[in-house]
């Protein structure tokens, strides 16, 4: 049966030339495999472009639409050499079949030669599909597109190239919208992953974004990646969006995308710390303890530096229990991270007015009290200035220490991905040679302890000290490693040793090994955070290195970010309004 292009019918209409339009509603599985003919009109837009060849009749046949056993097809000449039958594509063909007709022509023996659809044809055979739709182009048997006719060969090559080169993939915004529609229709994230053959991890991202009106709106308005928007969705919680965090993330994604992971982790840590601080503050407040701002304690003094009164023996420390009855009793709450990087809530006890309440210095008071000029007044001013500088330095140290902890999380995640590669960078051997030749303390310590950090980065369980006599899991990997992978394992051992030797002291007092390590990471593509850039010497420091590590909200205040903030505030306010309406409805 011949198909004709009829301008009065849509692309979905199927009709015989000599019969009224009709729709075949039989399932595709009911069709026979032996060239069961499906007749109809296959058209595009009825309007012709201005430069179209208007001499072509609308009744010109466009071919036969058949269902064919894919094993009977002959693969003709094709510009595609690598068919790339990846698992998701094969699963799609196995589940849904070939949805787009394969284009073919008959050779002089009547066999169908595939002109377009080589990949679909081979996938159908591979997955055991009984039939595939084939559109047989008009022409006499023997009008083979693989013939020696120069014009036909040129047309075939151009057609095969353009068929794939001019295809536009689904953008991430459309993917999120589609997954939201499937969620609305009752599918779970797991069902969406199975039905669409998209990796589960990606579907979790798209559905997370889809459930957040704030994240979805940010994705549509800004040029953000799915990974970035999924992070923004993390800060759109049940209690409403964290507008400041969303501002910082959005501006960072637009202005400094290389720093996005660092800003995101810093915000995560801040949120986690704030939650722990809030819990402890509530507990202290419930006990009647006044809580001070750690950055603004005024004239308050640590009770650890005081004794109860002048009658108390010198050196007796004023403890919190004894001081709890003092009207000036107060406390500050902060989160600190030790060598294990685990957050710990630290409570420091203070007295708001130690002189007023009769407390004296634990070891005696030596500070001058004069303030009306003379030597004592000058000394007092110098001491006050030094105290202010010390407070500013303390704030800087605390901020950089927290930034370092967050950067360590990002850095280790990057190292895991870096060391999972099959081979090391081309310039890894000089780093390996120099590190081994230097034989620094960091490497020796890691060797004696069984390379715990290297094992962690490689996803292995460390066996402990080398002296216990157990085989190190890294050694076991070398038994089957290729030379390239073995080089990567050596690099993992050295990087693990260097990483294990880093800590909060590294940004203030970097060693030679620290500088070598961070320089190598930078050269291999790791984006150093501002606090990590402080490790490098002046000669190696990048232009963005600064004395102080900016907080995530500092990036929002960067030049050119005001309009971004205004826009994201609108998005955030819309998101909060929607969240409020939802809560009210519930």
Image (spheres, grey):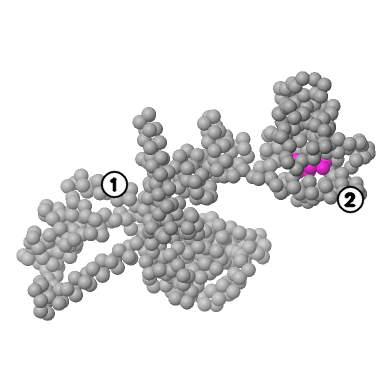
Q: Residue at x 35, y 31 (%)?
A: 584
Q: Is residue 48 visible?
A: yes
Query: Residue 414, image x and y in percent?
Result: 52, 59
Question: Based on the displayed image, in which of its 4 quarters is residue 359 positioned?
Answer: bottom left
Residue segment shown in magenta: 114-123
| Residue at image mark 1 | 279
Q: Is residue 272 visible?
A: no
Query: Residue 475, image x and y in percent?
Result: 58, 63
Q: Residue at x 77, y 24 (%)?
A: 15
Residue 524 to residue 111: above or below:
below
Question: Based on the displayed image, in which of its 4 quarters is residue 109 positioned?
Answer: top right
Count of numbered marks? 2
Specify the principal SS of the magenta part.
helix
Between circles 2 and 1, the one closer to the viewer is 2
Q: Quick check: marks 2 and 1 in contact, CB under 8 Å?
A: no
Q: Is residue 120 located in the magenta-colored stretch of the structure?
A: yes
Q: Is residue 52 located in the magenta-colored stretch of the structure?
A: no
Which residue reaches farthest bottom?
375
| Residue at image mark 2 | 150
Using residue 505 as the reference point, say whether residue 106 is left or right of it: right
Query: Residue 284, image x and y in percent?
Result: 22, 48
Quadrant in the picture for the N terminus: top right
Label 2 SS: helix
Q: Residue at x 44, y 46 (%)?
A: 234
């Amino acid at each position: 049966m011949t198909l004709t292009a009829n301008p009065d019918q849509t692309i979905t209409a199927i009709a015989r030339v000599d019969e009224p339009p009709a729709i075949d509603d039989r399932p595709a599985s009911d069709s026979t495999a032996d060239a069961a003919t499906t007749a109809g009109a296959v058209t595009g837009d009825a309007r012709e472009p201005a430069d179209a060849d208007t001499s072509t009749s609308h009744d010109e046949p466009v071919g036969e639409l058949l269902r064919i056993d894919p094993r009977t097809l002959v693969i003709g000449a094709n510009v595609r050499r690598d068919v790339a039958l990846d698992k998701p594509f094969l699963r799609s063909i196995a589940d849904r079949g070939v949805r787009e007709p394969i284009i073919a022509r008959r050779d002089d023996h009547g066999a169908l030669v595939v002109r377009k659809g080589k990949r679909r044809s081979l996938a159908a055979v591979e997955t055991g599909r009984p039939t595939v739709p084939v559109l047989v182009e008009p022409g006499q048997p023997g009008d083979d597109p693989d013939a020696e006719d120069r014009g036909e060969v040129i047309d075939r090559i151009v057609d095969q190239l353009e068929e794939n080169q001019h295809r536009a993939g689904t953008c991430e915004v459309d993917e999120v919208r589609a997954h939201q529609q499937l969620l609305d229709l009752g599918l779970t994230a797991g069902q969406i992953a199975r039905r669409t053959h998209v990796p589960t991890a990606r579907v979790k991202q798209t559905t997370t974004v889809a459930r957040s009106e704030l994240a979805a709106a940010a994705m549509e308005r800004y040029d953000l990646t799915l990974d970035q928007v999924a992070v923004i969705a993390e800060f759109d919680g049940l209690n409403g969006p964290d507008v400041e965090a969303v501002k910082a993330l959005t501006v960072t994604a637009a202005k400094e995308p290389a720093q996005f992971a660092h800003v995101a982790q810093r915000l995560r840590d801040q949120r986690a710390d704030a939650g722990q601080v809030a819990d402890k503050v509530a507990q202290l407040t419930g006990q009647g303890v006044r809580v001070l701002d750690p950055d603004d304690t005024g004239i308050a003094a640590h009770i650890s530096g005081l004794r109860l009164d002048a009658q108390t023996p010198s050196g007796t420390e004023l403890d919190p229990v004894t001081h709890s009855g003092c009207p000036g009793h107060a406390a500050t709450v902060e989160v600190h991270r030790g060598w294990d990087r685990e957050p710990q809530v630290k409570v420091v006890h203070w007295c708001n007015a130690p002189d007023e309440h009769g407390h004296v210095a634990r070891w005696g008071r030596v500070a001058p009290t004069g303030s009306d000029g003379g030597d004592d007044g000058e000394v007092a001013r110098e001491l006050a200035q030094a105290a202010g500088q010390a407070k500013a330095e303390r704030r800087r140290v605390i901020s950089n220490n927290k930034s370092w902890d967050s950067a360590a999380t990002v850095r280790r995640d990057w190292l895991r991905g870096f060391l999972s590669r099959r081979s090391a960078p081309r310039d890894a051997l000089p780093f390996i040679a120099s590190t081994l030749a230097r034989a620094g303390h960091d490497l020796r310590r890691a060797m004696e302890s069984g390379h715990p950090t290297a094992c962690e980065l490689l996803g292995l369980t460390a066996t402990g000290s080398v002296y216990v006599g157990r085989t190190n899991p890294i050694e076991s990997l070398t038994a089957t490693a290729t030379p390239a992978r073995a080089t990567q394992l050596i690099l993992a051992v050295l990087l693990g040793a260097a990483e294990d030797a880093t800590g909060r002291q590294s940004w203030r007092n970097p060693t030679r090994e620290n500088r070598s390590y961070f320089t190598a990471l930078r050269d291999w593509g790791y984006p150093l955070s501002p606090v990590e850039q402080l490790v490098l010497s002046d000669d190696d420091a990048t232009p963005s290195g600064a004395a102080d590590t900016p907080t995530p909200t500092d990036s929002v205040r960067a030049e050119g970010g005001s309009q971004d903030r205004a826009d994201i505030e609108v998005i955030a306010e819309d998101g909060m309004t929607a969240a409020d309406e939802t809560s009210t409805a519930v």
